[in-house]
Image: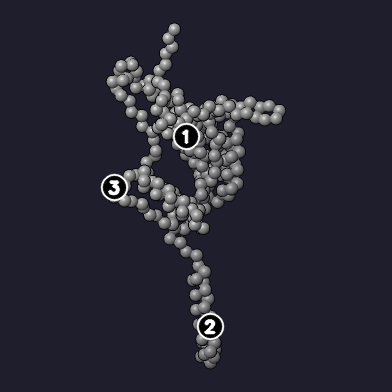
Amino acid sequence: MRNIISYFIKYHVAVDVFVLAFMAFGIFGALSLKSSYFPLTDSKNITIAITYPGASPQEVEEGIVLQIEDNLKGLEGVDRVTSTARENSGVINVEIEKGRDIDFMLLEVKNAVDRVPTFPTGMEPLIVSKLEVVRETITFAVSGENIPLATLKQIGRQVENELRAIEGISQIEMSGYPLEEIEIAVNENNLLAYDISFSEVSQAVANANILVTGGNIKTDAEEYLIRANNRSYYGDELSNMVIRARTFR
């Protein structure tokens, strides 16, 4: 240590060079250092999205979710499996153990799902994907006084389309708007006059809005999918719906 100090005292220019080099490397390292307020982490979750039109939560659970969960039991690398069954849909979340390759486990989960012998007729194809980690960058609100909610939603869609055209933006999510729905109002006096109940009207609406797959027919050249699609998406399509019909002889 005494020799080093003596050397720097004798050659003071070396001290200046050493200090300048230390500062230069420090500035270069600080500029090249990656930092983030919300650092991204590797995804450790795999989701299985279920779509089963017209099914109750119990049907989704018993006919689909439980079968998939049985095949996932004992799968090496799976830490925990949680599921949620809703009306017409469901989701299964598979948590992977720390240190496992998410891409390899994605293939393992897909193979486990494919081993399920049968699924209910009318179910949409399952979507198995890894849950990507998304970093939120900017959040802003669209508001206005005495402006209908439908107009605000339309403006929000326009802003969304313009933002999607900007390079570097991968995903945009809109929230705060209620789901669009069709409201059917009936006249109680007319129902009493024709002896029609509310449940009969509800059943007629359900029967007039179906989306069911009835299997397929294979030939030597083609394969035909049998599908009944009579779903209405606008209120005008339901205005002339027949509730009850009688034939007179």
Vertical order, 197 against 61 (above or below) = above
Badge 3 density bin: few <14, some 14–19, many ≥20, Cα 10 Å: few
| On-image quarter of the C terminus | top left
Mark 1 to mark 2 CA distance (whole Å): 66 Å
Q: Which residue in the rendered view is the most extreme toward the bottom?
A: 10
Residue at coordinates 66% horizontally, 27% vertically from top-left? Answer: 218
User: Can I make out residue 44 in this image?
Assistant: yes
Q: Earlier in the sequence, mark 1 or mark 2?
A: 2
Q: Name the residue under label 3.
A: 146
Disc 2: which residue:
18
Q: Secondary structure beneath disc 1?
A: strand
Q: Which quadrant of the view contains residue 73?
A: top right
Q: Nearer the viewer, residue 20 or 221?
A: 221
- For badge 1, the amino acid type reads Ser
Determine whether label 1 and label 2 are within 8 Å by CB.
no
**Chain-order first, disc 3 or disc 1:** 1
**Residue 113 vs residue 140, the one in the foreground:** 140
Sequence order check, earlier mark of 2 and 3: 2
Q: Which of 101 and 4 is in front in this view?
A: 101
> For the residue marked with disc 3, what is the amino acid?
Asn
Q: Mark 1 points at which residue?
A: 89
Compared with residue 73, is residue 203 higher up or lower down, i.e. above or below?
above
Q: Which residue is drawn at 60% across and 43% down?
A: 107
Q: Determine the secondary structure under disc 3.
A: loop
Q: What residue type is labelled 2?
A: Phe
Which-is-in-front pick, marks 2 and 3?
3
Left or right: 180 in relation to 94: left
Number of numbered discs present? 3
Q: Is residue 55 visible in this depiction of the protein?
A: no
Distance Cα–Cα, label 3 vs label 1: 37 Å
Residue drawn at x 65%, y 29% as measured from the top left: 223
Asked if labels 1 and 3 touch by Cβ distance under 8 angstroms, the answer is no
